[in-house]
Image (cartoon, coloured by chain):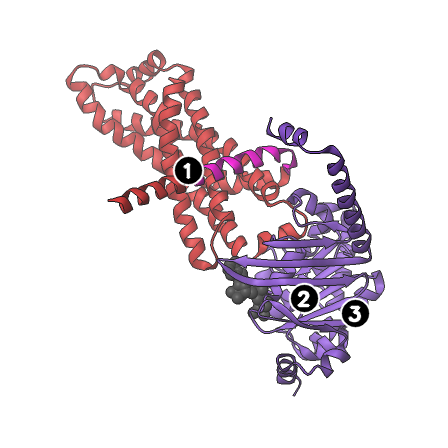
Amino acid sequence: MLSILSGIGNLIFQKLELFGQLVLLTIDTIKRLRFLDIKRLVKQMAHLGVDSLPIVLLTIFFTGVVITIQTAQEFIKYGAQSTVGGIVTIAMGRELAPVLTGVVMAGRVGAAITAELGSMKVTEQIDALRVMAVNPVAYLVVPRLIACIIMCPILVVFANVIGIIGSYIITTFYDSITTQMFINSIKVFVVPHDITGGMIKACFFGAIIAIVGCHKGLNTAEGAEGVGTATTESVVLSIILIFFFNCILSALLY
Amino acid sequence: MNKEFISKSENSEDKKAVFKEFDAINQEMVAKAKEDMVKLVDVSVELDGRYILKDINLTVKRGEILVIIGSSGSGKSTLLKLIIGLLKPTSGQIWIDGKNITMIHEDDLNEIRLKMGMVFQYSALFDSMSIGDNVAFGLKEHTDLDESVIKEIVTEKLGLVDLKGIEDNMPNTLSGGMKKRVGLARAIAIDPQIVLYDEPTSGLDPINSKVIDELIVSTKKAIQATAVVVTHDIKSAFTISDRIAMLHEGSFVIMGTPEEVKKSENPVVKNFINGFVT
Ligand SMILES: Nc1ncnc2c1ncn2[C@@H]1O[C@H](COP(=O)(O)OP(=O)(O)OP(=O)(O)O)[C@@H](O)[C@H]1O
Ligand SMILES: [Mg+2]
């Protein structure tokens, strides 16, 4: 009994310590924002953001499709077919697009960041940076954090568009939902804040992905196995934190 | 609140005397340390409850080449990492060019590191950058030199390690020995006053080893650079060194001129040297 309790206690301490380290890295990164190098930032934005566009579009397109398949039928049953476009767009803009983009980015970008920084760590390239009087946080973390914070909301905009297109395509199969109805319901139900709120969320998710990815990478244990473990941990932790902060942000924003 | 209480409760005369004494010791140490480029005082490193280095005392004078020998796992790389501040000692002090770097913040340490260069045991080249960018890295980060001047310096330094014309190659297209030499070119690109070499010639053929040995000596002569060289190559140790120190299980068993080391009767030293010389 006692050992179970102490085990739980240890686990909580470990998690708190990890959380503290993430906060410290965030503070350290913010302190070094003035070292931001535009060339490196653009490179990261292309690498982390633009290259993620196809997979984000694909994921959200199918999400738009599937959510419409599920809702349209039911809405028509209750005579609410004129609201489908608006409802889907609100769900997309507020929750689905930012969260799913976040999750996809955590899997793709978070993993890439951790793997890259992790292999730099185990091959002593991080040490080489330090020896050459270059701060690894300023050099590696700052451009990645800014790139993620800028690119995530932009990806979310694209995600919204493609998600609604996916939804619209499905509604064309239902005779009772006309194009006019679909567009009108969006006009009536949706306010700009539904979209901008989602973009604000995406900024936070981008920051989570970058900070967790960098922290796990910079603290990778020796060896190729260490890089693998760190990458997995990075993705899992990012996704958990994204869902957690999504709750808080939803409560605050809406 | 607490501090105020303590300072009030102490006799102020006593305190002055203590401070004076402390100041004198401090100044003496600074003066002494200035003649020495690298100075380690009673340094120990404990990792996972095991002493990797124990009570290390070491001074390297300006313009001196100190060679550190010792069997695998004796703590040689750890010693170099201490000197350049990648690792903090568990106890003891480390002085570089008259500054105590034991406890200072990484940002202040970076000022001192501008005077230092390090050749890593496994090269540690930036694998996302071309060879040219690797060698130019320090110059680009820390100087305002023109692109064309930097290019010239890179060509010159690569020439020194006998690797002309590979600026545009990526590190993963090079052999281990070539990487090592690029690492060396990168380390000396900013003409550092202190260069740390971690096995610069291991994995090199005899001709290239000789080139590197000569380079270490000529760098020293050209800019009065101080060098700490870790090597397994006993022959080169005796040719390039002003002094040799041997690490054994985390402590020095001998430190002296090559002649003194050759004459040593210490069985550990004798075995180690003869094992390689014959
Ligand atoms: N991060 C670490 N954690 C725990 N022990 C370590 C760590 N790094 C090194 N050691 C231990 O410290 C000792 C000295 O290591 P070091 O790399 O300094 O040896 P070395 O003399 O350079 O050996 P080699 O000639 O093989 O390069 C070894 O026994 C090693 O196991
Ligand atoms: Mg070593």
Viewer-proximal residue among B90 and B79: B90
Distance, label 1 to label 3, CA atoms, is: 52 Å
Quarter holding the C terminus of chain A is top left
Is residue A210 covered in magenta? no
Q: Residue at x 26, y 29 (%)?
A: A67
Q: What crowding class fits label 2: few (fewer than 14 Cα within 10 Å), some (14-19), or many (20 or more)?
A: many
Q: Classify mark 1: helix, strand or loop.
A: helix
Magenta stretch?
Answer: A17-37
Q: Nearer the viewer, mark 2 or mark 1?
A: 1
Seen in the image, is B242 located left or right of residue A166?
A: right
Distance, label 2 to label 3, CA atoms, is: 15 Å
Can residue B123 be seen here? no
Which secondary structure class fits the magenta region best? helix
Chain B drawing hue: purple
Is residue A21 covered in magenta? yes
Q: Nearer the viewer, mark 1 or mark 3?
A: 1
Number of numbered discs visible in the structure rendering? 3
Q: Position of residue A59 (x, y in %)?
A: 34, 37
Label whose residue precedes the other's in the sequence (2 or 3): 2
Tag 1: residue type?
A: Leu
